[in-house]
Image (spheres, rainbow, N blue to C red):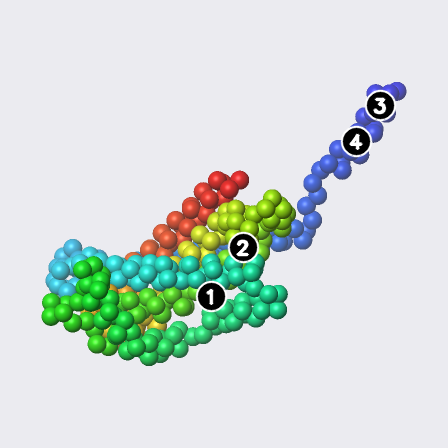
């Protein structure tokens, strides 16, 4: 009798332990999966289109490299553009990241409660400004930077990136890669700041209060509790800003003039992939159009590698944090 009773009593418990999947959960799961597959399909479609349109350039590179712009093949043509793109993006990150982290820390842990939302909202508004406006501002800024560039060439000219030309002169228009980097740093500042601010706001309050209770100063609390907690988020924000800097077109195209790669950042002529496409695409046709699409494919690959690297860094940082 007791055995039968125990069996009957355990039957309801077994039914209760089973996971019941509701129709709404099934619909949401299917919709989320479909959205993910759709995004991957679009990404694959873009890659396939760029690769298909680049076949003429690939064939010309092997059959007759002199047909490619520059007359030396595709790699010598695209390599300076890759270097210019990476240099401008890295310089903009070096300038923007410290300011973004500082602003995020100030708005989340130091600013008065009434001032912090206003300051955060003002920073976010920078992301809504069109690229053309930044380009116009960069043009106005470039002429005002000539004096700074002259000072850099005079006192730091022994460094190749700040060296003048053979005649000891620098760009008199200020339309250099360094100016474009300044403009890019302002453009990516609100992106990095907003993401880092949200990460800092997620720091467990108990950890901050524990650090202060143990006698830590506010800076020590930030260094021991806030920054370690937000490391992965900072890396993600910086990589997202890097992606924006790599693909920015109009502002960079308006600031830079056409020309090949120059070691010095104080001379005109440096170019990026996006600016090269913007300058030449309207009048391109035939093989020249295929060339521009090919360098677009290169930029697509660079952006993909940057995002994959960011995910890998964030994953490693998260695991170490745990």
Q: Nearer the viewer, mark 1 or mark 3?
A: 1
Who's the residue at 36% across and 52% down the image? Answer: 305
How many other residues sit within 10 Å of disc 3, few (<14), some (14-19) or many (≥20)? Answer: few
Q: Earlier in the sequence, mark 1 or mark 3?
A: 3
Whole-angstrom CA distance, mark 4 to mark 1, is 58 Å
Which element carries disc 3, helix, strand or loop? helix
- Mark-to-mark CA distance, 3 and 4: 11 Å
* Residue for badge 4: 11
Precedes in sequence: disc 4 or disc 1: 4
Percent of width and height locating residue 192 = 46, 60
Mark 1 or mark 2, earlier in chain:
1
Q: Are marks 3 and 4 in contact (CB under 8 Å)?
A: no
Q: CA distance from mark 3 to mark 2?
A: 57 Å
First-in-chain label (3 vs 4): 3
> Between 88 and 54, which is closer to the camera in this rendering?
88
Percent x, y of residue 293: 28, 64
Foreground tag (4 vs 1): 1
Seen in the picture, residue 114 relative to 237 is either above or below; the reply is below
Q: Is 102 on the left-hand or right-hand side of 251?
A: right
Q: Nearer the viewer, residue 275 or 67?
A: 275
Q: Is residue 180 above or below residue 52?
A: below
The answer to whether marks 1 and 3 mark residues whose Cβ atoms lie closer than 8 Å is: no
* Circle 2 crowding by C-alpha within 10 Å: few under 14, some 14–19, many from 20: many
- Viewer-nearest of labels 3 and 2? 2
Residue beneath disc 1? 190
Label 4: few (<14), some or many (≥20) within 10 Å? few
Q: CA distance from mark 1 to mark 3?
A: 68 Å
Mark number, residue 199: 2
Residue visible at 34% across and 68% down?
Answer: 182
The residue shown at (79%, 31%) is 11
């Amino acid at each position: 009798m007791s055995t039968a009773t125990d069996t009957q009593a355990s039957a309801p418990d077994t039914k209760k332990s089973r996971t019941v999947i509701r129709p709404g959960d099934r619909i949401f799961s299917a919709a989320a999966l479909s959205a993910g597959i759709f995004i991957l399909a679009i990404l694959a479609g873009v890659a396939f289109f760029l690769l298909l349109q680049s076949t003429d350039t690939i064939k010309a590179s092997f059959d007759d490299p002199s047909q490619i712009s520059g007359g030396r093949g595709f790699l010598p043509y695209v390599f300076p553009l890759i270097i210019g793109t990476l240099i401008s993006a890295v310089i903009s990150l070096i300038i923007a990241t410290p300011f973004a982290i500082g602003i995020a820390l100030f708005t989340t842990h130091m600013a008065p409660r009434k001032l912090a939302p206003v300051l955060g909202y003002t920073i976010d508004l920078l992301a809504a400004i069109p690229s053309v406006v930044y380009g116009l501002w960069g043009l106005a800024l470039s002429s005002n930077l000539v004096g700074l560039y002259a000072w850099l060439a005079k006192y730091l000219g022994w460094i190749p990136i700040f060296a003048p030309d053979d005649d000891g002169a620098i760009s008199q228009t200020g339309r250099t890669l360094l100016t474009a980097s300044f403009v890019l740093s302002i453009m990516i500042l609100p992106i990095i700041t907003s993401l880092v601010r949200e990460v800092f706001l997620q720091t467990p309050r108990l950890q901050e209060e524990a650090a202060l209770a143990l006698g830590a100063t506010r800076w020590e609390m930030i260094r021991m509790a806030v920054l370690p907690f937000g490391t992965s988020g900072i890396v993600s924000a910086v990589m997202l800003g890097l992606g924006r800097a790599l693909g920015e077109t109009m502002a960079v195209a308006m600031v830079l003039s056409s020309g090949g790669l120059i070691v010095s950042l104080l001379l005109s002529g440096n170019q990026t992939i996006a600016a090269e496409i913007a300058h030449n695409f309207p009048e391109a046709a035939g093989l020249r159009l295929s060339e521009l699409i090919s360098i677009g494919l290169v930029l697509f690959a660079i952006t993909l590698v940057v995002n994959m690297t960011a995910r890998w860094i964030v994953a490693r940082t998260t695991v170490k944090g745990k």
